Each structure stands twice: as C-alpha cells, then as structure tokens.
Amino acid sequence: MNLRKENSVLVLLGAGASKEAEIPTSAEMIERVEHLLTTNSDWQSYRSLYYFVKSAIYFADGIDGKFNADVNYNIERLVNTLSELDKKARHPLYPFIGNWNIKLAELGGDDFKRIGELRQMIIRALQGDWVLLSDYSKSEYYRGLYSFAQDFQFPLRVFSLNYDLCMEKNRKTEILERGFGDQRKWSWRNFDHTEEAPNIYLYKLHGSIDWLRDEHKNLTFSDEASKIRLDQLEIIFGTDYKLQYTDPFLFLAYEFRRWTLEAKLIITIGYGFGDEHINGILGQALASAADPDERKLLAVSTFFQKEEESAARTRLAGILDVSENCIVAKRKTASEFMCSDMRIDKLGEHFPEGGDLFEELPNLPAK
C-alpha cells in the first residue's frame, strides 16, 4: 500500500485537541455554565430553568436505556435543545403539541423569552475567554500539523469540530486555505485550487468564532472576533444543524464525506466520538474499504486514560460498527502526538509490515 500520496492522510480535530491550550472541552463548558449559575448574580435566576432542561435531556436518554456516563450531555446538546425550545410556535412540531410541560412554561417565561436569554448568555460566554485566547503561545504545538504538511509534500486536509483559532494563529509562512478570497468572502471554489496548492486545507465543520454574515448574507470573517454581534456569529451547535442548506455547512459536510472515502489513514485528535453524524461518516468510510488494512482510523485522545488502548479500540469499533482491525487507539495528548508522533515513519507503523507504505519522493524546494 502506498500511503504517501495526495489525500491519503486526513485529520479530524475534536475539542480535546485544544485542551492543552486552555480552551475548555464541551463537557468542561457545561461545568463552567453550572458554576456561573451558582456564583454569578446575572446567571442565578436561570438556574431552575437550566436544571429543568438538563433533567429533561437525561430523562429522554433514560427512556432509551442510557444512564449516567452513557448520556451524551455537553454544551452542544444543551444549546441545541435551547434553540429548539426557543422556536416554540415556529417549530414544525408545534401544531402536534397539545400542551407544553407546565413547569417549562413557568420557567421559560412569556413566549419562552427566558430560554432564548439563557442561550444567548451561554454563547456570549463562549465568544469571550472560553474560546478566544489572549496568548496563543499555549497552542504552539499546533505547529506540528504544519510541519507534517511540509514533510508530507502534499496538501493536508484538516477538518475541525472546534470554533477556536489555534490553527490560524499558529500559521507562519505556510499557506492555510480556509475558504476566503481576496475580498474576505467565503467560496467553495477556494478549496478547488488550480494554481499553487496550499499546505493545509482547513474545514471548520461547526463554524468559527471569527465568522459572521455581512449585510448581503455572505460569509466573511472579522479580525476582532469578540466584537461580533451574537445574531451575526456563524457557529452551529448539535448534530441536527450540520446539514443546513446554507453554505458553508452543507459543503463542509460533503467534503468530509468525500475525503474520508479517499484517505488511507484518518487521524482523529481529541475527538470523543459523541457525534452520531460524524461517527456515521467515519464508519461508512472505514466499512467501504475492501480490506480492513486498506483504510485505518488512528484515534488519539486522553479520553482513553480510564481504559486500556485495546479496550478503547474495541469500544470505538462498536461505536463505528466496523472491524477492530480498522482501529488504532493511542492514549496521548494532542501536543505529544502533534510534536512527536505526527511523522511519516511513525504513522507507517500502524500498517502491516512488508507493504510499500510511503513512496519516496525527490527533495522538493520548500514553499
């Protein structure tokens, strides 16, 4: 098998990839919300509403036999639930609802106004120091992805589930393509270069903390992300929003599907496998290979710290509904992997011996 060729390696970044940069994971954001609800006077009046919504989410999963740690409860699911509730009469299911839960109607306020207010407070906190860093030197280990792209000698496709700017802020002289042209307008055509290819294509599947819509509904970005109005901020929460009909989200989901089917090695860094939509695409890509050794998923995460790597491998194979031979689980931090293991020779170790894993290329001038 020849791994060293264009589009043979794909990277997916989850929340754990930015944890060492002191950007909280989705679960840690929930902890921060609950701390604010008990300590901050601006938040305390929403505490009962929050507890009701959280309890309802756990109740719904309990009906399906999921309890305790099996409940996938994080910031995305919370905000997505609040968004759906906030629609109220505008929700497609509204005509089929005889009566709202009496307690929800009481806590949500007139026309569920307080539900929308709680959602905005969470997003405003996320837009602040939860995701935006004052010192990006903490995320310098992201340079490992750029180093690998240079050594790989082909454009590296990096998909991210994160809103943060760790990839963008750690670019030096490399070319990072994230979809914006000279006039700062996003276009899918920027991912289809005919001239000099970039070092990295960056696809931000959930949007970005610096994305917004201009007055003509074009996607653009701001150099002052903290000043973007909440109604302009272009980020999405929850699996139900990934296939929106608007660009860029439908295009990004399509690209993730497309390139996972091309890749020989899919590397996930800091991804907890709690997203059914992403899991479905990964599982289909792995299952589509004629031989389990033709396409592998290398899962790198500290989430495996409570289980052996072999047990994590078995669990992930069950989640993705694929053969265990497709999965390699590594219990490492993002910085350890990006700085030490994100090398062609190291990656080749995860394939059977004897195969022609990497094609030796002539030395090319650095870009």
Image: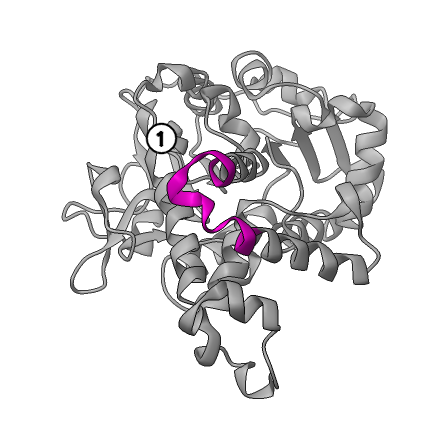
Q: Nearer the viewer, residue 220 or 2?
A: 220
Quick one: quadrant of the C terminus? top left
Instruction: Give the residue at x 55% y 60%.
Output: 81
Residue 366 pos. (x, y %): 33, 17
Residue 225 pos. (x, y %): 25, 39
Q: SS of the residue at dot 1?
A: helix
Q: For residue 331, what is the image quadrant?
A: top right
Q: Is residue 203 visible from the viewing direction of this image?
A: yes
Quick one: quadrant of the N terminus? top right
Residue 317 pos. (x, y %): 80, 42
Q: Which residue in the structure is indicated by mark 1?
A: 129
Q: How many marks?
A: 1
Q: Is residue 257 visible from the viewing direction of this image?
A: no
Amino acid on which the number 1 mark rests in the picture: Asp
Q: Nearer the viewer, residue 128 or 33?
A: 33
Please, is residue 251 above or below residue 190 in the view? below
Q: For residue 208, what is the image quadrant?
A: top left
Instruction: Give the residue at x 58% y 25%.
Output: 359
Q: Which residues are magenta?
A: 36-50
